[in-house]
Image: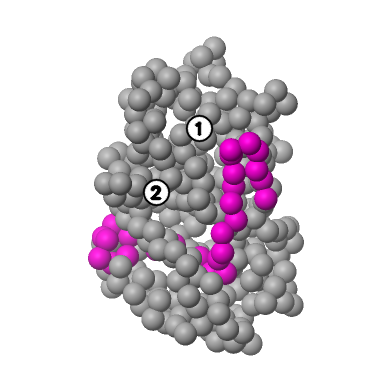
Amino acid sequence: MTQAQKGICAEPNLHALYLTFTVVDDDSQAIRVKLARILDLLSYFDDEYYEAMVSGVLAIGTNYWYELYPDIIPKELAPFPDIHCEDRNAPNSPGDLFILIKADRIDICHAIGVEIVQLLKPHVDLYEEVRGFRYLDGRDFTGFVDGAENPRGMKKFDVAIVGADDPDFTGSSYLHIQRYQHNMQKWQLLPIAKQQQIMGRQKTDNRLLNSADLVTDSYTARVQITTPNKNNSALLTQNMPYGDMSTQGIYCVSCANSPLPFIKLLKSRIFGDDEGHYDKLLDYTTAETGGAFFAPSVTFIKEHAKD
């Protein structure tokens, strides 16, 4: 039976480490073998430190996929969408491999990251390292709960995992990343009522605003992406705040059984509707990185490490 990577649908953790690598040599077989070893490494730490609730996601950049697995291509594999409108942008940054490490202990995230970086040398350069953490009761630095639109329970697997329609890649996931940096000074000048209008939710209890008060340029309105079965949960996100005393933002990871929901969401936020109602939250936060990746099943990675 095909096994999906544990971290795709895992419950939220207290800490995360986001690692993006660029591959600097052409030894594809060595990379394939080491990807399988990374999965073994995650399993080892999960067993050894079971109380830390360790999980991870290993994904291959959509451009690099054609070098790493040239003979077998996911049905909907696509590059990161190039979307720009006025001062709202979705930049595409370098990235051949992306690894998300999650745990309830920051030292375990660090220890796994060190092992992975050492394992991948000298084949890669570390492009970016970001450490995320749970903030208060699952909130972003804006003060609002993040992930309110996420599916729950077994619905997560229906949304995030490729099914039998692409049998070679059952158990896989299309993954997109974006790192946003907030303008907290500008945001904090807003009265709470205005913040709630922009987010489309109450700040204290995360309740949706009444339909009469929910404006079309709110974040909530712009991310309500319908699927053919009218289910608004078209994406599963694994987001976390990151930052220090000078810089604050959110690292966004979207998982889905197709790249189309993410593309549709990005267009909805940046371009807006036919009347130009874009996501007003983008006036207070800026995407600084972006990338399209594909997270194959554990079964796929281990089978192709033997080639």
Which quadrant would the N terminus be assigned to in this image? bottom right
Residue occupying the point 60% across, 73% down: 300
- Picture layout, residue 241 above or below residue 79: above
- Residue 163 place in picture, x, y as percent: 66, 57
For the residue pair 53 and 33, the one nearer the viewer reads as 33
Residue reaching furthest to the top: 212
Q: At label 1, which amino acid type do we have?
A: Asp
- Residue 132 place in picture, x, y as percent: 35, 53
Res 240 label:
2
Q: Mark 1 — residue?
A: 283
Q: At label 2, which amino acid type do we have?
A: Met
- Picture layout, residue 189 above or below residue 152: above
Residue reaching furthest to the front: 87
For the residue pair 167 and 82, the one nearer the viewer reads as 82
User: How many labels were placed on the picture?
Assistant: 2
Residue 103 colored in magenta in the image: yes
Camera-nearest label, 2 or 1: 1
Magenta-drawn segment: 82-109
For the residue pair 299 and 198, the one nearer the viewer reads as 198
Q: Residues within 10 Å of mark 2 (few under 14, many from 20)?
A: many
